[in-house]
Image: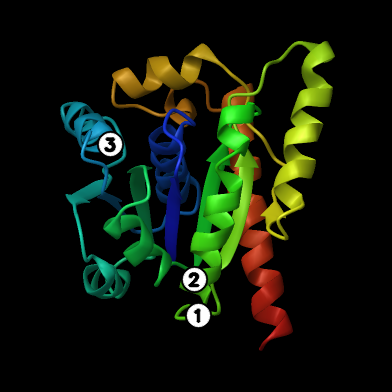
Amino acid sequence: MILLVGGEKGGSGKSCLAQNLAVFFAKELEATVLIADCDPQRTTSDWIQARNNDPKLETINCIQLYGKIRNDLLSLNEHYDYVVVDCGGSDNLALRAAMSVANHVLIPMRPKRRDIKTATHMEDMLSTCKMVNPKMIASFVITQCPSLPNQAPRILEAKEVCASFGINVLDSITYARNIYDDSEEKGTSVFEVEPDGKAANEIRNIANEMLAIKQEISYEFG
């Protein structure tokens, strides 16, 4: 499975989400996993470097890829159960190339107007890439949500706006929690810091919801 975590807006937690999902696949599904870091900022590559310095942590393989990466991803997909692609927050060649082969495109969106405004362009990109990759599944996921109860309407509004583009929106969300930043700085994941914590359950819910969608579509089309 090629899972692309990408989008046009920076700061939505794409790298953090890609890292934690990769650890979930490796630790809890006991799958072979590779992260393709396509972000020039090298956030995930730096995370991997910090991670590799701790022999107690689950090994996650990582490779840096840029530009026309379609064939590279197809080749890597033959050797790993999951290839998680971390793309930077911009419309670039690597993002479109990854969309052309991805099984699932996960698009993190914060419940902020400047993030939601990018949904129009993302819908255009997805429509174009679906011409060459008709089996691609795409989902928005609302991330870094405020935890105050009076902010719940903002989260619901963000989901409704994203759904208006005819693209699936995950029920699962992530909240703004310090554990995400703290674990990333150390090369760890929320699963290794607090395996039964709220953040770990947020990532589990996202992963399981994506896998359920994949299974449902596979069942429908045989």
* Quadrant that contains the N terminus: bottom left
Q: Is residue 187 above or below residue 76?
A: above
Nearer-N-terminus badge (1/3)? 3
The residue at the point 49 percent across, 54 percent down is 29
The label on residue 128 is 2
Q: Is residue 76 above or below residue 106?
A: below
| Extreme residue toward the bottom, this view | 222
Q: Nearer the viewer, mark 1 or mark 3?
A: 1
Q: Amino acid at mark 3?
A: Thr
Q: Considering the numbered disc 3 on the image, is that residue within a helix, a strand or a loop?
A: helix
Cβ atoms under marks 2 and 1 closer than 8 Å: yes
Q: What amino acid type should be assigned to the residue bearing mark 1? A: Met
Q: How many callouts does the rendering have?
A: 3
Give SS at disc 1. Answer: loop
- Quadrant for the C terminus, please: bottom right
Query: For the residue marked with disc 2, what is the amino acid?
Result: Thr
Q: Is residue 122 left or right of residue 48?
A: right
Of labels 2 and 3, the one closer to you: 2
Regarding residue 196, the answer to whether it shows in the image is no
In space, the residues marked 1 and 3 are separated at their CA atoms by 30 Å
- Estimate the spatial distance between the alpha carbons at disc 2 and disc 1, rounded to whole Å: 6 Å
Residue at image mark 3:
44
Q: Nearer the viewer, residue 7 or 75?
A: 7
Q: Position of residue 98 (x, y in %)?
A: 36, 63
- Position of residue 95 relative to residue 172, above or below, is below
